[in-house]
Image (cartoon, coloured by chain):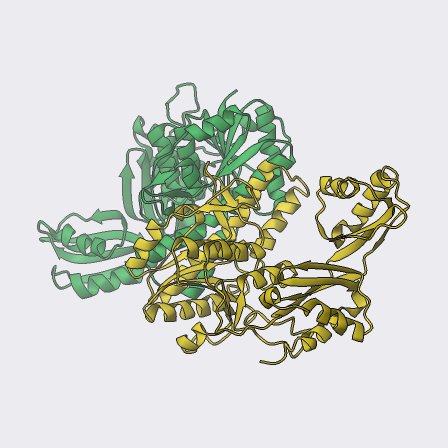
Chain colours: A yellow, B green
Amino acid sequence: MALIVHKYGGTSMGSTERIRTVAKRVAKWARAGHQIVVVPSAMSGETNRLLGLAKELAPAKPDESYSRELDMLASTGEQASSALLAIALQAEGQPSISYAGWQVAIKTNSAFTKARIESIDDARVLADLEQGKVVIITGFQGVDENGHITTLGRGGSDTSAVAVAAALKAAECLIYTDVDGVYTTDPRVVPEARRLHTVYFEEMLEMASMGSKVLQIRSVEFAGKYKVPMRVLSSFTPWDIDINEEAASGTLITFEEDEQMEQAVVSGIAFNRDEAKISVLGVPDKPGIAYQILGAVADANIEVDVIIQNLSKDGKTDFSFTVHRNDYAKTLDLLKEKVLHSVGAAEVSGDAKICKVSIVGIGMRSHVGVASKMFRALSEEGINIQMISTSEIKTSVVIDEKYMELAVRALHKAFDLDQA
Amino acid sequence: MALIVHKYGGTSMGSTERIRTVAKRVAKWARAGHQIVVVPSAMSGETNRLLGLAKELAPAKPDESYSRELDMLASTGEQASSALLAIALQAEGQPSISYAGWQVAIKTNSAFTKARIESIDDARVLADLEQGKVVIITGFQGVDENGHITTLGRGGSDTSAVAVAAALKAAECLIYTDVDGVYTTDPRVVPEARRLHTVYFEEMLEMASMGSKVLQIRSVEFAGKYKVPMRVLSSFTPWDIDINEEAASGTLITFEEDEQMEQAVVSGIAFNRDEAKISVLGVPDKPGIAYQILGAVADANIEVDVIIQNLSKDGKTDFSFTVHRNDYAKTLDLLKEKVLHSVGAAEVSGDAKICKVSIVGIGMRSHVGVASKMFRALSEEGINIQMISTSEIKTSVVIDEKYMELAVRALHKAFDLDQA
């Protein structure tokens, strides 16, 4: 019998009917003798409804006092859903109690709307668990040192659940969601995509950062920092399926490399079309040039992802990088106005019709030739690679966005990801 | 320039448009140099929506742990409306900050869903006021000594506002509502009813207890205990009316008898048809009989209002009392089953078609003949009086409910309440 944290997303909490189903599932785990802590999200749509009201009142006022009030407002969604779940559990005959973030001292910094958890007081929760209660802790929120309510930003309930699991030294943190696990790639693009039984923490981190929306990247980072075993599983399986079957379902995110476990070279294919490419051509190749270009971009608070500098030729070089598509026009304008002439470049150009496709796998650390296998698979499909970026466990390429699905399918097949 | 508490009800906070109007009104008071604390209710309909969700999950489970969760749930309504008002004020350029009950230590006992305020920490609020902020404090809620959120029960926001005003030693507590003051009687029954400029605390207490719905009776009791001057005024006057005109509008509830002020013998006519009459006839007239009858009723948690014992005749007496209509059938059954035979009564009978009409006035203390004037006015209309009950500043009669409006109009005229 173990201490286990369950996290349920907004869709799982989306109606009283669904909350009742969550209660039945949680009560099943409690009856099996486990100590259960639940971290629920707000009912789906509720956070948007509340923030929509705020927007009607103050269309744009992004200062700190406004952000503080947004957190006061948004935090009510999780408090309500937590109380409703406690009531549903009691109706099932399962003793339970709900706590707002401040009541169990989920201390955060004061960065309203995007706070970071600093500590959690576990004494109160452990005492309730000892008494046989299911303890429900509001996700997404905390309290700063001055007693102001904070929220963790979108998807913050995942992070809350992991932080609670870490503080309570939970055996596992089960993230119940509307998908049944982490897949080798998006099944909507590759019907043969397989669910992974396990995925390594670093792989998950790369996949999350590459746009795989299953888990919020901060929750994965947190899990890695505190070595909290996380499992992603579906909240839409019947609540009364066998508990052992349920406990082994979904995808487990692990931290230790186990030789017994499936050890594919590549675990998954991630992709996104959120980025755009910017090129600064004919730049004099001298020290400080990268800083002059990217420093101006960073000063405008624009995040840069892939960066490529071509080989120099005749004392000139070309410089390319990608930014989020939302920042594309702004970045082009900025470079044309402030950078083009000052660095003596010939031209600034851009392309928003690109995508990024990556292969991710912890096995790449110990295997050679993985990247070249990727490039060959793409070339066999006649896909031109525009940019390449590599890390220890990931190789990404930037290509024309019209080839995205084709590339993903080709790579999925080339690395035998459709084979169990 | 003074410290003033504003309280806005659910209707006044019922939409973002109305919240914006509240913000403009509050900002006007702040710009005039006053220190303003606002206690808002939840947006109208919100508390019912939340409690409705709870009811779907647990149709009936009135134990303490369930009540605790109801308070966690219901308290979110005021937290959200308070944050929205703070945002609306900031959009008006008025610095403001909102606090949940626990953040300014509105300490209550642990009677969930009907808690009583014990203390408020004023330091934080006063510091914000000094900085020129409008401080918004959630109504209706507090926190008990174990850090559990409590609510004060329906209408509790009025009580919160008065308690905050008492703690901060506010000059006045303005209760903004959907009526423009306290009237001599309900204008829907008597079109000539006049708004009172002032009403004495004790009169207000009697009127509130008699079903005049302008103020929650507990808030009036609280105001009396701490001598907080309260004013009931309309939130539907244009927000930009002259502040001095607004400050003198509505009805002021006062505590000191001022000879200068209007000193009518009778200030108002209250009435309700919430009660039903129960009679226990032919009861042996011996000591302990009242206790045997009413003790059984009290044990069943039924509240009794007017009680009459007839003069004894042949060693027998009749015993009549009123209960809330919702308790009528239950009380009759109880008496027939448990009391009728044990006290040796001849018969138990009841009548739900009654009403109670009262004249209220602090002047009754020092005037004789007020009650007989009331009885004459009723007799001139051919209205039979079934029960009479008197207190120092009130005389109530129970009559057939079909005469209610007629009786109210006759009394309003008999006591010249239509004359300024």
- Specify whether A295 is left or right of B394: right
Q: How many marks?
A: 0
Residue that extends furthest to the bottom in the rendered view of this protein: A419
Residue A185, given in percent of the width and then of the height, sits at: 64, 71
- Specify whether A410 is left or right of B239: right
Q: Vertical placement of A243 versus A397: above or below?
A: below
Residue A53, given in percent of the width and then of the height, sits at: 61, 48
| Of residues A207 and B45, the one drawn nearer to the viewer in this rendering | A207
Q: Residue at x 81, y 70 (%)?
A: A383
State the image quarter where residue B357 is shown: top left
Is residue B414 among what the camera can see? no
Q: Vertical placement of B144 versus B132: above or below?
A: below
Q: Residue at x 9, y 53 (%)?
A: B315
Is residue A279 among what the camera can see? yes
Residue B275, given in percent of the width and then of the height, sits at: 34, 53
Q: Vertical placement of B266 versus A302: above or below?
A: above
Q: Is the C terminus of chain A in the top left, top right, bottom left or bottom right quadrant? A: bottom right
- Specify whether A15 is left or right of A303: left
| Of residues A253 and A332, the one drawn nearer to the viewer in this rendering | A253
Q: Vertical placement of A358 versus B412: above or below?
A: below
Q: Is the N terminus of chain A in the top left, top right, bottom left or bottom right quadrant? A: bottom left
Residue B171, given in percent of the width and then of the height, sits at: 45, 24
| Of residues A332 and A45, the one drawn nearer to the viewer in this rendering | A332
| Of residues B83 and A191, the one drawn nearer to the viewer in this rendering | A191
Q: Residue at x 77, y 44 (%)?
A: A290
